[in-house]
Image (spheres, rainbow, N blue to C red):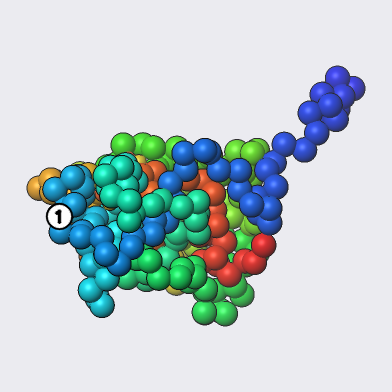
Amino acid sequence: MFDALSARLSQGYRTGAFPPAQPNLPEHFAGRPVVSKDVDVESLQPICPTGALCRDCAGASAIDTGKCIFCGKCAEVCKGISFKKEYRMGAMHREALLATDAEYHPEEQLDRGIARLYGKSFKIRQVSAGGCAACELDFNVLNTLAWDMGRFGIQAVASPRHADAILVTGPVSDNMLLALKKTYEAMPKPCLVIASGTCAISGGIYATSPQVNAPLDGILPVDLYVPGCPPHPAVLLEALLRLIAIRK
Ligand code: SF4
Ligand code: SF4
């Protein structure tokens, strides 16, 4: 007992300071990009594996971060594209995932009822719907001592009947479609739907497969899109806190 207490004291507090401190991102972290107006996205499209280079509704050059796998190939050949350290990439509307050169402000949760419902306790059922497992791993990381999402009342649960939200990863393969729908149907309503990772948002690198049913928002009503392949834990945690209107 004394040894255990002594070890605990010597190890100190291991949970990261983010948030409210800034996250400790890796040197090569690629966050939300900036795309200059003069970038000829059409000429770059052949090098993009997921068709993420596009134009927004106003015709501005853009990267669709819901399709981008952040491989960096476009930025290597085009000076007008740069990936920043902006980790606040989660969005509550699909169109907000289009990154241009416009000044960026992450979307705020405008529904004050959300904070009242989920502000102290937010239970998430994760469904792995055919991805490569990296998105799942980085969600699991949030359960660890280092990230400890439980300090915000956020917890992963095994049963959909105990869940406030379903977090889907992967491109929704044919084999997972029925299980995904049944899981959603088993959840008490209202509940939130989170598309975590490029595969869930758009199909990502699997989008053209005939066995894939992505985008998730064609199957379930998505409340939060979290870009990344996979989303860094800081990206996901910040987006979750913003979704449920917890300010840190
Ligand atoms: S970084 Fe994104 S937009 Fe650029 S080539 Fe890779 S997938 Fe396409
Ligand atoms: S988005 Fe990327 S990391 Fe996540 S499941 Fe798809 S391929 Fe894997």
The kind of residue on which mark 1 rests is: Ser
**Residue extending furthest toward the right:** 2
- From the viewer's perspective, tell me whether residue 89 is left or right of residue 149: left
In the rendered image, residue 175, in percent from the top left (x then y), is placed at 20, 44
Q: Is residue 217 visible?
A: no
Residue occupying image coordinates x 69% and y 41%: 15
How far across and down, in percent of the image, does residue 167 sit? 41, 54
Splitting the image into 4 quarters, where does residue 117 fall?
A: bottom right
* Image quarter in which the N terminus is found: top right
Circle count: 1
Q: Residue at 32% of width from left, 47% of height from top? A: 75
Query: Is disc 1 placed on a helix, strand or loop?
Result: helix
The residue lying at 62 percent from left, 66 percent from top is 246
Residue 224, image x and y in percent?
41, 64
Residue assigned mark 1? 43
Which residue lies at the image location 39% right of the left edge and 44% below the top edge?
230
Residue reaching furthest to the top: 3
Name the outermost residue toward the left.
Answer: 210
